Image (cartoon, rainbow, N blue to C red):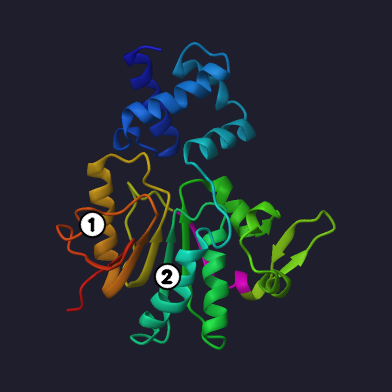
Amino acid sequence: MDEKDWETFKKKLNDKTGIDLQLYKEPQMKRRIGNLVTRSEFKTFTAYFDNVVKNKDTFAEFIEYLTINVSEFFRNPDKFSKIEKEIIPHLLKKSPKLNIWSAGCSIGAEPYSLSIIMKELTPNVRHRILASDLDVDILAKARKGEYTDNELKAMEPARLAKYFTKTPAGTYLVKPEIKSPVEFKRHNLLKDKFESGFDLILCRNVVIYFTEEAKDQLYAHFFEALKPGGILFVGATEAILNFRKLGYTSFQPFFYQKPEK
């Protein structure tokens, strides 16, 4: 697996999916994908790629592995408690209807968690929750809204009973009242145009392999996408050290605010 092989693989991947590995930390991604190639008993990145694209299901598994789709409802409950008790009430003082974006939504656990919170805080108001991801197969799972016990392990039993229907197979389906406000969309954070006018953007556990330049570009785009006074929430290991340079103020740890005009 030489450098020419790696460069060819990156081009093929970009041409096929729009995923540009030039914007990811190369040593980490090369090692992560290399381990997969070796385990699959291929000698080169391109040989592995040429084989995996032949089967839709296998290719979908590869993309899921590549984009690190790990999620669960109310992941990091302490942070969701802050969203429910402090962040959302603060934003509702400015606007009765919120425009929220779950960027890199994976299986949909995060936007549906937000939908539950909004339902309970403002039962008669319809907010908009945009949920985007790069992986079309993961988005299909999110739209279906069917989850396992493990994906719901942080869910309060009362909420589980109220907002989900248990299936004969032992999984749980999100009820229509929680599904309805959530709008799913395929979106490449490093390539596609951003909407604007968001009160709250969540982007957690997405940028782990991004280069520092790609992160700064992403956070700058989020800044433009937020309303004045809007808030960006990032993951517990993704503190934005240069947030002032990017124009943000610190609202709370891991919550960054676009200043009011």
Q: Residue furthest right?
A: 168
Residue at position x 52%, y 83% in the image: 121
Q: Quadrant of the C terminus?
A: bottom left
Left-right relation of 85 to 259: right
Residue at position x 52%, y 16% in the image: 38
Q: Is residue 83 magenta?
A: no
**Nearest the eye: 144 or 220:** 220
- Are circles 2 and 1 on residues that touch, CB within 8 Å? no
| Residue linked to disc 1 | 220
**Nearest the eye: 177 or 117:** 117
Q: In which quarter of the image is the N terminus?
A: top left
Left-right relation of 143 to 217: right
Q: In this view, does 32 lie above or below 116?
A: above
Question: Could you tell me if residue 158 is visible in this image?
Answer: yes
- Quarter of the image for residue 146 reads bottom right
Q: Is residue 14 above or below residue 100?
A: above
| Residue linked to disc 2 | 100
Question: Could you tell me if residue 98 is visible in this image?
Answer: no
The disc labelled 1 sits on which kind of residue? Answer: Ala
Question: Over which residues does the magenta segment extend?
Answer: 178-186
User: x, y (%) of residue 14?
Assistant: 39, 33
Q: Is mark 2 on a helix, strand or loop?
A: strand
- Quarter of the image for residue 142 reads bottom right
Left-right relation of 243 to 231: left
Q: Residue furthest front?
A: 78
User: x, y (%) of residue 74?
Assistant: 55, 63
The disc labelled 2 sits on which kind of residue? Answer: Ile
Q: Characterize the local packing of mark 1: few (<14), some (14-19) or many (20 or more) Cα atoms within 10 angstroms.
A: some
Residue at position x 62%, y 29% in the image: 55
Q: In this view, does 149 lie above or below 230?
A: above
